[in-house]
């Protein structure tokens, strides 16, 4: 019986990818990372796996967003993923990519969705005077950070927190959330939300 195949999309540091790799290495996650895909050639995330499992295309060099999305879709499809995980991936995925992988496409976002979709979530939570913050793993739909939430992790916001201290304290909790959701995914416990009628 072959292991569930996970494709990871990342644009930067890749600490969530590393958490997935570590969980697999310590036999906490029965899966295989079959590819790491990035819009940023040379990003640290790519160096966390062997060269054969890296794919990168400089999105800025592409003739159009559609060209990048088509190349990404073909590259991810080629590894036959059972799950596609956006973990620190900083591009908005095109509708074609989302439609192709909608039943197996997850994202981790550093806020307690539906609060603070988009960027600078830690600063926004601080500026709002929130008492807690967190991260969410959700299904990906074409709208940014708007898919149904699968699970969240919460931490208190401390009086002297800065965006940096808040992000740093949240990160280990994110890693645990990421692995916990993938354990459920590879165990067959996650069913994609019933796709709403288009345009609903
Ligand atoms: C994390 O906070 C994650 O929630 C967000 O990007 C940040 C960087 O993640 N999506 P990583 O270290 O690149 O995995």
Image (tube, rainbow, N blue to C red):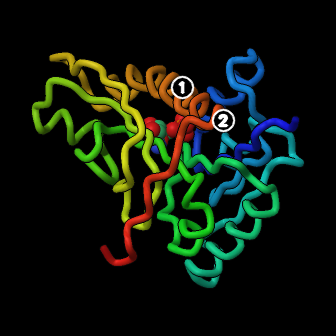
Residue at mark 2: 186
Q: Position of residue 96 (x, y in %)?
A: 57, 75
Disc 2 to disc 1, how far (Cα)? Answer: 10 Å
Q: Position of residue 177 (x, y in %)?
A: 48, 27
Q: Quadrant of the C terminus?
A: bottom left
Q: Position of residue 184 (x, y in %)?
A: 57, 31
**Residue drawn at (49%, 47%), measured in percent from left and top?**
107
Q: Position of residue 89 (x, y in %)?
A: 54, 51
**Residue drawn at (58%, 50%), measured in percent from left and top?**
11
Residue 180: which disc? 1
**Residue drawn at (79%, 56%), measured in percent from left and top?**
80
Circle 1 residues within 10 Å: few <14, some 14–19, many ≥20: some
- Quarter of the image holding residue 12? top right
Q: Relative to residue 149, is residue 65 depicted above or below?
A: below
**159 sits to left or right of 133:** left
Q: Residue furthest bottom?
A: 63
Circle 2 residues within 10 Å: few <14, some 14–19, many ≥20: some
Q: Earlier in the sequence, mark 2 or mark 1?
A: 1
- Quarter of the image holding residue 147? bottom left
Q: Which secondary structure lies at badge 1?
A: helix
């Amino acid at each position: 019986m072959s292991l569930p195949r996970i494709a990871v999309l990342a644009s930067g540091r890749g600490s969530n990818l590393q958490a997935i790799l570590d969980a697999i290495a310590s036999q906490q996650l029965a899966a295989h990372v079959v590819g790491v895909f990035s819009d940023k050639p040379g990003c640290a995330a790519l160096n966390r796996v062997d060269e054969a499992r890296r794919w990168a295309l400089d999105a800025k060099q592409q003739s159009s967003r559609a060209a990048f999305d088509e190349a990404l879709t073909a590259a991810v499809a080629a590894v036959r993923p059972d799950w596609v995980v956006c973990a620190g991936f900083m591009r908005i995925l095109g509708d074609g990519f989302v439609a192709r992988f909608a039943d197996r496409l997850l994202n981790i976002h550093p806020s307690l969705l539906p609060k603070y979709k988009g960027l600078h979530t830690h600063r926004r939570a601080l500026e709002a005077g929130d008492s807690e913050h967190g991260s969410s793993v959700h299904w990906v739909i074409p709208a940014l950070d708007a898919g149904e939430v699968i699970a969240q992790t919460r931490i208190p916001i401390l009086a002297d927190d800065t965006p940096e201290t808040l992000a740093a304290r949240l990160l280990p909790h994110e890693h645990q959330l990421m692995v916990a959701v993938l354990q459920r995914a590879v165990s067959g416990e996650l069913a994609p939300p019933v796709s709403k009628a288009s345009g609903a």
